Image (tube, rainbow, N blue to C red):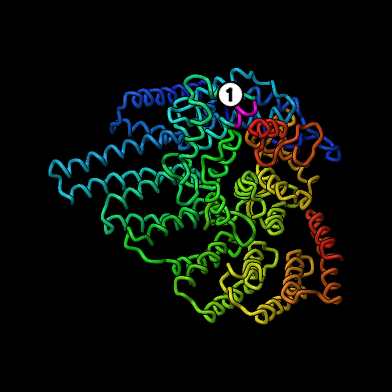
């Protein structure tokens, strides 16, 4: 059977190479016709990574858009018809891309091409006609993310769509609050979704800035987030959660606070918060003693307190030393890091 | 250099004493890479043409790290690279492919590696300056960012690529370094890591591109070394391999992105290098050569070079020293930078 397989592969190679050859010949002749478009589709269905083919596909469309525009300005095509034709082209191509995207969800070029088409809609059509296409795309992005909730491109793509939908060109307004709800929905189906937690960090900053939140409102948001993460931390082995917790702690760090959601806490407030965190995390040790993240967080809280208070008592130092000893037992992979930390602290 | 994967798979062969120290099958890797361009009877050879020039860079660098710099004929390499140049000065992935930042960077890296940057000055190629201008033309002068090509996709990968190639060409003055550095800063997250853009989550690949760009610009002072080092060190998993983001699978290519970043900020000792070496070695195809992303998967030249580069950074014996910023042999970077001075 292997020979049979080889000869079939040889045939496929021949077909593919002939297709590409024929395509390149037409490109050399500057023959950007609908027939060439068909060839790009055939090649891309076999090989969506072939970026030059995507470029040619766009060049063909640019030609078509120009010609429609020309008919409008010179040959009496109505605006209604012009928009209709442009919309048809864009929507047909978005449909063509859909099965490819399902098959190759990690192929950059497919996402790039979709965004290009959508951008064309924004620049060539009135907002009222372009906006629904973007809204449809947001639904698609949601679908893709529910299939694979950590897809890197998926999250980036969703942010791009939101940026456009918020833009003036599409008569948009901020959607940060809706997006924050979306991250909460994603977190509630899977707590360990670092992508969603990350998005929260950025969205909260925006929401607070957009409503010119005062210090009380900021504090309230901080309290809500701490409550949310405390609830989530019932699974202390999940590092996504601890990274989000660490994000929130930045508000209590004099060197980092200015960039956080609560930049103007007083030193006394910061201390109060960190002590609360310290107690909360210490309590976790009642149930779990073999989780390295707990010890890391405890040490971090202690160091933060020392930073705010400009020093650490002998007793606290002993406590840190004990945690570091536990940590070294549990986290052999990063022993070099913990040894260095011990040296730095002089313990 | 074809990107055809396999035919072999990474993994320790059955029957081998697991207690035996893992070793590097140097000769087999050399033969594996040399054989890649003979596999034209496989469809995948043709379907990966859009990565051909990157593939030459990966294969050539792997051979250099293995101490076999002459395993591929130099003249053929130069001829092939030059055949990929477009009229605009940039390079496509293969002849008749459009110019793109990523293949242009590979072209410059290859020519630098075989000490042939002077070829660019030969008739019809427009000189270093033409390539430099192509790359500089992809910078957005408002935001400092770089696009991958004329169609405008923006990513810190392209910014790093521009810095890499332009510094090798000694043409950094063509771009606004200050704005680009400010953009990199904006991509930093609270966890110390970097994203593809200012809103994106931290990713090990972006740690490499952003810290690499800062290293080239002489701005490592902007990195929060402890915080980034902490995030990077948490990428190591119990099996010794490294992942690219929290709660993801280990992969040999991340042994490079994470490890080189740790090296650039002097935190290489924050992970278990011995366990990582063993993990990479377990990803070798001990029979046919080549390295895979993780044991049991098909080998390919991409994971082969990054596996070898990782081993080199870890000081594995028998390998040529690699430069963590450029992923090229250290002595070649020293030669290029000296020349440019």
The location of residue B85, given as percent across then percent down, is 48, 26
Q: Residue at x 45, y 36 (%)?
A: A51
Q: Residue under circle 1?
A: B118
**Horizontal side, residue A200 vs residue A164: left or right:** right
Residue B159 to residue B247: above or below: above
Q: Which residue is drawn at 55% across and 19% down?
A: B79
A213 within the magenta span:
no
The location of residue B297, given as percent across then percent down, is 65, 38
Q: Quadrant of the N terminus of chain A?
A: top right
For residue A53, which quarter of the picture?
Answer: top left
The reply to whether residue B96 is in sight is yes
Chain letter for the residue marked with disc 1 in the picture: B
For residue B173, which quarter of the picture?
Answer: top right
The location of residue B232, given as percent across then percent down, is 69, 53
**Horizontal side, residue A246 vs residue A324: left or right:** left
For residue B81, which quarter of the picture?
Answer: top right
Q: Quadrant of the C terminus of chain A?
A: bottom right
Q: Residue at x 25, y 40 (%)?
A: A66
Magenta: main secondary structure: helix
Q: Is mark 1 on a helix, strand or loop?
A: helix
The magenta span reads B109-114
């Amino acid at each position: 059977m292997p020979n049979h397989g080889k000869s079939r592969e040889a045939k496929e190679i021949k077909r593919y190479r002939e297709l590409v050859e024929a395509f390149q010949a037409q490109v050399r002749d500057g023959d950007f016709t609908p027939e060439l478009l068909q060839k790009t589709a055939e090649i891309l269905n076999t090989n969506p990574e072939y970026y030059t083919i995507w470029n040619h596909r766009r060049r063909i469309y640019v030609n078509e858009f120009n010609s429609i525009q020309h008919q409008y300005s010179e040959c009496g095509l109505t605006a209604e018809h012009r928009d209709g034709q442009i919309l048809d082209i864009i929507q047909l191509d978005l449909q063509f891309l859909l099965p490819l995207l399902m098959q190759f969800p990690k192929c950059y070029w497919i996402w790039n091409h979709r965004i290009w088409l959508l951008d064309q809609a924004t620049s060539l059509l009135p907002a009222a006609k372009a906006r629904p296409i973007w809204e449809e795309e947001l639904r698609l992005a949601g679908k893709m993310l529910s299939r694979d909730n950590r897809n890197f491109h998926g999250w980036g793509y969703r942010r791009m769509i939101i940026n456009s939908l918020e833009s003036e060109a599409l008569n948009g307004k901020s959607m940060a609050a809706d997006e924050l709800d979306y991250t909460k929905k994603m977190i509630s189906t899977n707590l360990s979704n670092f992508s969603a937690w990350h998005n929260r960090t950025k969205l909260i900053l925006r929401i607070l800035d957009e409503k010119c939140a005062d210090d009380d409102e900021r504090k309230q948001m901080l309290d809500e987030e701490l409550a949310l993460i405390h609830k989530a931390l019932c699974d202390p082995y999940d590092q996504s959660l601890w990274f989000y917790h660490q994000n929130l702690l930045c508000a209590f760090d004099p060197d980092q606070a200015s960039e956080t959601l609560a930049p103007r806490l007083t030193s006394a407030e910061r201390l109060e918060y960190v002590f609360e965190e310290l107690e909360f995390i210490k309590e976790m040790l009642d149930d779990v003693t073999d989780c390295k993240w707990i010890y890391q967080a405890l040490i971090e809280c202690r160091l933060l307190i020392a930073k705010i208070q400009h020093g650490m008592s002998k007793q606290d130092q002993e406590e840190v030393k004990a945690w570091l000893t536990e940590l070294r037992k549990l986290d052999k992979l990063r022993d070099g890091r913990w040894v260095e930390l011990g040296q730095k602290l002089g313990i | 250099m074809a990107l055809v994967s396999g035919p072999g798979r990474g993994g320790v062969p059955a029957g081998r004493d697991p207690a035996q120290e893992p070793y590097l099958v140097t000769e087999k890797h050399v033969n594996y890479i040399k054989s890649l361009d003979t596999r034209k009877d496989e469809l995948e050879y043709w379907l990966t043409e859009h990565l051909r020039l990157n593939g030459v860079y990966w294969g050539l660098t792997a051979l250099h790290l293995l101490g076999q710099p002459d395993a591929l004929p130099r003249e053929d390499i130069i001829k092939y690279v030059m055949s990929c140049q477009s009229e605009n000065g940039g390079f496509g992935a293969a002849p008749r492919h459009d110019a793109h930042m990523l293949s242009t960077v590979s072209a410059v890296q290859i020519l630098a590696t075989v000490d042939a940057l002077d070829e660019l000055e030969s008739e019809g190629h427009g000189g270093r300056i033409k390539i430099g201008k192509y790359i500089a033309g992809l910078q957005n002068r408002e935001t400092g960012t770089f696009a991958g090509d004329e169609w405008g996709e923006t990513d810190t990968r392209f910014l790093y690529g521009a810095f890499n190639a332009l510094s090798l060409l000694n043409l950094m003055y063509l771009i606004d370094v200050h704005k680009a550095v400010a953009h990199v800063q904006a991509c930093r997250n609270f966890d110390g890591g970097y994203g593809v853009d200012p809103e994106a989550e931290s990713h090990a690949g972006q740690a490499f591109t952003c810290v690499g760009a800062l290293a080239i610009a002489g701005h490592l002072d902007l990195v929060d070394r402890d915080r980034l080092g902490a995030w990077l060190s948490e990428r190591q998993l119990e099996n010794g391999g490294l992942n690219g983001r929290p709660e993801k699978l280990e992969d040999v290519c991340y042994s490079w992105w994470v490890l080189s970043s740790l090296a650039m900020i002097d935190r290489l000792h924050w992970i278990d290098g011995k366990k990582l070496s063993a993990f990479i070695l377990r990803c070798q195809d001990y029979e046919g050569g080549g390295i895979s992303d993780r044991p049991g998967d098909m080998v390919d030249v991409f994971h082969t070079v990054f596996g070898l580069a990782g081993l080199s950074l870890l000081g594995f014996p028998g390998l040529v020293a690699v430069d963590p910023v450029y992923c090229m042999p250290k002595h070649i970077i020293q030669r290029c930078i000296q020349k440019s001075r």
